[in-house]
Amino acid sequence: MKTKQASLFILVILVLLAAGLSLLGPSIVQKETANQVNKQLKPSYITARGIVETEHDVEISSRVNELITKVLPKKGDSVAKGDIIVEFDRSKIASRLSMAKASLAEAKAQLKELEKGTRQEDIEISMHRMKRAESIYEKAKADYDRQKRLLSSKATTIVDMDRAEEKMRVASEELNENKANYEKSKTGPRAEEIERAKASVMRASAEVSHIEAQMKDYTIKSPIDGFVVEKFKESSEIVNAGEPILILIDTENLRITAELEETNVGSSVVNQPVEVTTDTYKDKIYKGRVTKVFSAVKRKSQRLFDPASTFDINTQEIHISLDDYTGLKRGMTVTVKFLK
């Protein structure tokens, strides 16, 4: 009896297990199949948002503290490389240049005179001046000696004798100076004097060159072919050195700048192929490659649906070059697909 009951119990358990497998089996198989399908459908690439930028954005800044006389292009105007785009008031620096050139001319004339030596007529003039100084000194000395004799006999005053002595002293100094000039005129200028004159010419010439170099900063020419996207200053405004005046962009050299989110940081490499799409041209796919991967990761604020709520994420900047930029304009947003 007990054996029959045990057999019946086992039979019931087997029936229940069979029923359970019949119910759960398909769902297990379906789940495994779905997992396999999901693995097959999981994309083998990552995507990122990007923006079309220019390779060359040039900020035109002043190198001088001066009044702007002309800012030629307007915002949106095209400019060619070498075009004059900004001019400054030159009146002050032009005056400095004129004075520097005059000093240079004077220094050159003095050097030329020293190198030619002393003329015979100049020697004769120096000799006549020396002889005249000798005559004045002899007269002053004779007057002093006379005052000295008169004072010994109390026929004059000490004041008169002191005056005579002072005149003799001045005459003696002038005589010594004229004698030195005469000797100098006979021997000609010393080598040291000529070297000093040459140094004066070099200093004056360097000053002229320095001011002429500064004058180049009073005219700004466009360094690229492009157009004006920003204009900060107008004519008749005073600008300080380093202040921006214009921003130019080169529209011929574009690039894509994309940002990988922190979950994908490090997954892109240089020369990795990419596909770029934009909402403007939905059916067009732009081919390209990664040209630069920035090693530094920067922090970026991300806005939620609530305008008052934001959160920070880490992003990695990537530069991309396309084979063709037809239709793309600076500032357009695109989607970048990084291929394996």
Image: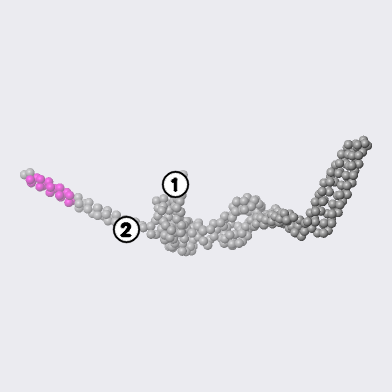
Which stretch appears magenta?
3-19
The residue tagged 2 is 40
Q: Which percent across, then down, holds residue 27?
A: 25, 53
Report the front residue among 120 and 72. Answer: 120
Q: Are marks 1 and 2 in contact (CB under 8 Å)?
A: no
Is residue 164 shown to the viewer in this render?
yes
Q: Which percent across, then down, holds residue 53?
A: 50, 57
Report the front residue among 102 and 317. Answer: 102
173 to 291, vertically: above or below: above
Number of numbered discs: 2
Earlier-in-chain disc, 1 versus 2 = 2
Is residue 229 shown to the viewer in this render?
no
Q: Amino acid at mark 1?
A: Asp
Q: Residue at x 80, y 53 (%)?
A: 183
Q: Please, what secondary structure does the residue beneath circle 2 have? A: helix
Q: Residue at x 46, y 59 (%)?
A: 291
Q: CA distance from mark 1 to mark 2?
A: 33 Å
Render colour scheme: one colour
Mark 1 residue crowding within 10 angstroms, few (<14) / some (14–19) / many (20+):
few
Does 295 sit left or right of 21 as displayed?
Answer: right
Quadrant occupied by the N terminus: top left
Q: Quadrant of residue 43?
A: bottom left
State yes or no: residue 293 in magenta: no
Report the front residue among 108 and 87. Answer: 108
Q: Please, what secondary structure does the residue beneath circle 1 have? A: strand
Q: Amino acid at mark 2?
A: Gln
Report the front residue among 293 and 171. Answer: 171
Q: Quadrant of residue 83?
A: bottom right
Does 31 sit left or right of 310 as displayed?
Answer: left
The residue tagged 1 is 312
The disc at residue 35 is none
